[in-house]
Image (cartoon, rainbow, N blue to C red):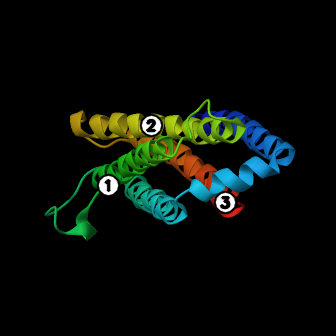
Amino acid sequence: MAAVGTIVWLSSELMFFAGLFAIYFSIRSVRPDLWAGETEKLNVPFAAVNTLILVISSVWCQLGVFKAEQGIGSRQGSLLQVSSWGMREWYVLTYLFGAVFVAGQVFEYAELWSHGIALNANAYASVFFLTTGFHAIHVAGGLIAFLLIIGRSMTARQFTHRQATGAIVTSYYWHFVDVVWIGLFAAIYLLQ
């Protein structure tokens, strides 16, 4: 039931982000001159590296899911033996990469503000900050979910099916925000 509920909820989130994409492309079609000037200020290589960090975090997340499905909640050996890691270690790594991604977004916002692109500067800036900002909020929500899953695995005496289910549905959400970001990255940074 948790997996089905999560998928239904993610479907509603998909509609939310579809609306943001519609806003982005509608305003872009009305003001192509504004887009031409403002997109030059974007740091595409930095955003590409930040995107890669988020994509890699999804790989770490999936490795944690594989361990959760096997009932391995935490490492079975030394911390330096990656092959002995459990779900918790992979999720901690996922959390760290996700936090670096959000920090990268904050850094990018500061850079754009220094170039005069603030939320209220023009239509481009409003749409840019609206779409990427809502995505960043969703990533932050995923990071909170990872903290809850990691904390639950640390306080439990035994890794149970219920904990594995929580880890798996959290991965659904994380992969969702990853795919949404790939779409945003393509629309905002590559389709200039």
Kind of residue at badge 1? Leu
Q: Which residue is mark 3?
A: 186
State the separation of the CA atoms marked 2 and 1.
Answer: 15 Å
Q: Mark 1 highlights which residue?
A: 93
Amino acid type shown at disc 2:
Ala
Q: Quadrant of the N terminus?
A: top right
* Amino acid identity at mark 3: Ala
Residue count near mark 2 (Cα–Cα under 10 Å), binned few <14, some 14–19, many ≥20: some
Tag nearer the camera, 2 or 1: 2
Spot occupied by residue 15 in the image (x, y as percentages of width and height): 75, 37
Q: Residue 148 location, x and y as percent?
A: 35, 33
In the image, residue 86 sits, relative to residue 168, either above or below, namely below
Image check: 178 left or right of 84?
right
Q: Which residue sits furthest left?
A: 78
Contact, mark 3 vs mark 1 (Cβ under 8 Å): no
Mark 3: which secondary structure? helix
**Helix, strand or loop at mark 2:** helix
Residue at 55%, 35% in the rendered image: 118
Reading the image, the residue beneath label 2 is 140
Q: x, y percentage for residue 92?
A: 30, 50
The earlier-in-sequence mark between 2 and 1 is 1
| Closer to the camera in the image, 7 or 101 | 101
Q: Residues within 10 Å of mark 3 (few under 14, many from 20)?
A: few
**Residue 117 location, quadrant:** top right
